[in-house]
Amino acid sequence: MADKELLVDLDAIDLTTPIADIEEIRQYNPQRFEMEQLTGILYENMEEGVAVAYKDITDDDFWTRGHMPNMPLMPGVVMLEACAQACSFFCQKNDMLGADMLGFGGLDEVRFRDPVTPGDRLIIMCKLIKARRNRMVVCKFQGVVNGSLAVEGVLRGIPIPTKQLQAALNSK
């Protein structure tokens, strides 16, 4: 395993059997089509404030043709989106923010350590650091591929005012 301590002991959980599939993820996360960046949820522990999800990377992912030609590397921004969706699923399922939708509020201490390519399974771990209802959630996250840390950081999630946003969009 990676030298850095992981948020979850992956040897202690079943990495082969999801506890939630894409249909359950869709109950909590609004992303669809190309923007769905989770394949399944593997583990949740509300007492410890941790969850483990995964994204199976394929040749059919929208970015493989152009990033980079003949050497497809998962873009860092897409890795971050996958991590954000894992954090969002956990926070929304457990109603930590009290919001219809959770959005990006910021990123800190982000590091990219190893490449992610088609054929890989990106295991995403998130740990809740702070939850302020109706204001913000803060989660640490890590992404691991083949036992190596690929990405890590701290994510802030904020409530998205869906009703106001929809009204503004409808008035255009």
Image (cartoon, helix red, strand yellow):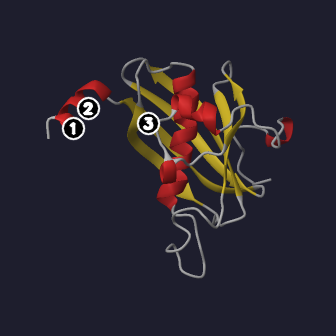
How crowded pointer 1 is (Cα within 10 Å; few <14, some 14-19, many 20+) is rated as few
Numbered label tally: 3
Q: SS class of the residue under badge 1?
A: helix
Mark 3 = which residue?
156
How crowded pointer 3 is (Cα within 10 Å; few <14, some 14-19, many 20+) is rated as many
* Amino acid type of the residue tagged 3 in the rendering: Arg
* Picture coordinates of residue 135, whole percent (x, y): 36, 23
Q: SS class of the residue under badge 2?
A: helix
Q: CA distance from mark 2 to mark 3?
A: 23 Å
Mark 1 = which residue?
169
| Quarter placement of the C terminus | top left
* Picture coordinates of residue 65, whole percent (x, y): 53, 74
Residue at image x 53%, y 47%?
Answer: 36
Residue at image x 59%, y 82%?
Answer: 70
Q: CA distance from mark 1 to mark 2?
A: 5 Å
Q: SS class of the residue under badge 3?
A: strand
Callouts 1 and 2 close, C-beta under 8 Å: yes
Mark 2 = which residue?
166
In-image side of 122 versus 160 (left or right): right
The answer to whether residue 148 is seen in the rendering is yes
* Picture coordinates of residue 86, whole percent (x, y): 58, 38
* Picture coordinates of residue 139, whole percent (x, y): 53, 34
